[in-house]
Image (cartoon, rainbow, N blue to C red):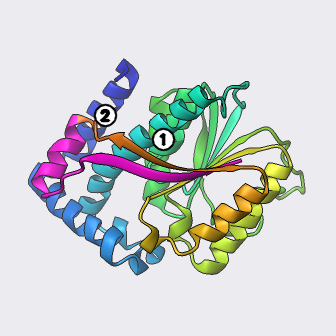
Amino acid sequence: MDPLTSACLDALERRHLADLTLSEVSRALRALSSCYVERREKLVSGGPLSSAGKRAAFALFYGPQHFVILQKIVNAMKESGALADRAPGTLIDLGCGTGAAGAAWAVSAGIPAIQGFDRNAWAIDEAAWTYRHFQLRGRAARRDIGSANVLGADQEGRRPRGGRAVLAAYAANELEPAGREALLASLLDAHKAGDRILVVEPIARRSLPWWSKWEAAFLSAGGRADEWRFPADLPDIARRLARAAGLDPRELTARSLFL
């Protein structure tokens, strides 16, 4: 692990365990894990981040996990040649959460600027902290990523130039069906305008009944679909929380779509 990432994790642990014990956060992680696996209807309402314990658990367990997974995916795609050309100047992080996934792509690919969007105020603040720590220019702001214009013209009617990197990691599945349809259309339009698009979600098909439609759309547009399995070499704080919560991540898995 590079020194900047290690320092980020140390600072993250100090911040989130300042007023909570590891035991309290591990109990919250069990509840959070149950919500993601068994009660996904709560995702749309923001239930996973409804308490300080759950927010700390998300930041200390899922954030580092998403960072590691995105870093491994980006590095694998660079090695395969899919990301071998010049890095974009800006990354758009849709449903940015704590900013971990977007920061992983930006740092791994040498993208200097980032713009995060999320609907949760706590996540926006957390993402802004993450971007600052990794010395990325940009900010996070509140926006509904399921809106029809999420990647389109600004309030003055100016359309963005193509050539950006656009990430939607662990975000599309938390939208209502109509919002997810709007997001898919926005991503396909952004690709036509010259942006490169990466979508990442969990590998379990039972929670992603919409994935096959998205996969067909990306493949039809000349993209690729991948499933990933990596050794679970999680940071120390994530491993400690997993053990305390009775979780046993043997490997890190994800599926992705890329244009």
Q: What stretch is highlighted in magenta?
A: 236-259
Identify the image quadrant of residue 48.
bottom left
Q: Percent from the top left, x then y, of residue 1? A: 34, 23
Q: Badge 2 is on which residue?
A: 9
Q: Give amino acid for label 2.
A: Leu
The numbered mark, 2 or 1, whose residue comes first in the sequence reads 2
Q: Which of 198 and 155 is in front in this view?
A: 198
Q: Is residue 150 visible?
A: no
Judge the density around disc 1: few (<14), some (14-19), many (≥20) Cα neighbours within 10 Å: many
Q: Give amino acid for label 1.
A: Leu
Q: Which residue is drawn at 65% across and 40% down?
A: 91
Q: What element carries label 1?
A: helix
Kindly check if marks 2 and 1 are in contact, taking CB atoms under 8 A apart as contact.
no
Judge the density around disc 2: few (<14), some (14-19), many (≥20) Cα neighbours within 10 Å: many
Q: Percent from the top left, x then y, of residue 99? A: 48, 45
Give the Cα distance between marks 2 and 1: 16 Å
Q: Badge 1 is on which residue?
A: 70
Q: Which residue is drawn at 23% across and 69% down?
A: 31
Identify the image quadrant of residue 206.
bottom left
Judge from the rendering whether residue 21 lies leftward or rightward of residue 76; answer left or right: left
Q: Nearer the viewer, residue 253 or 6?
A: 253
Q: Is mark 2 on a helix, strand or loop?
A: helix
Q: Residue at x 56, y 72 (%)?
A: 175
Judge from the rendering whether residue 82 lies leftward or rightward of residue 98; answer left or right: right
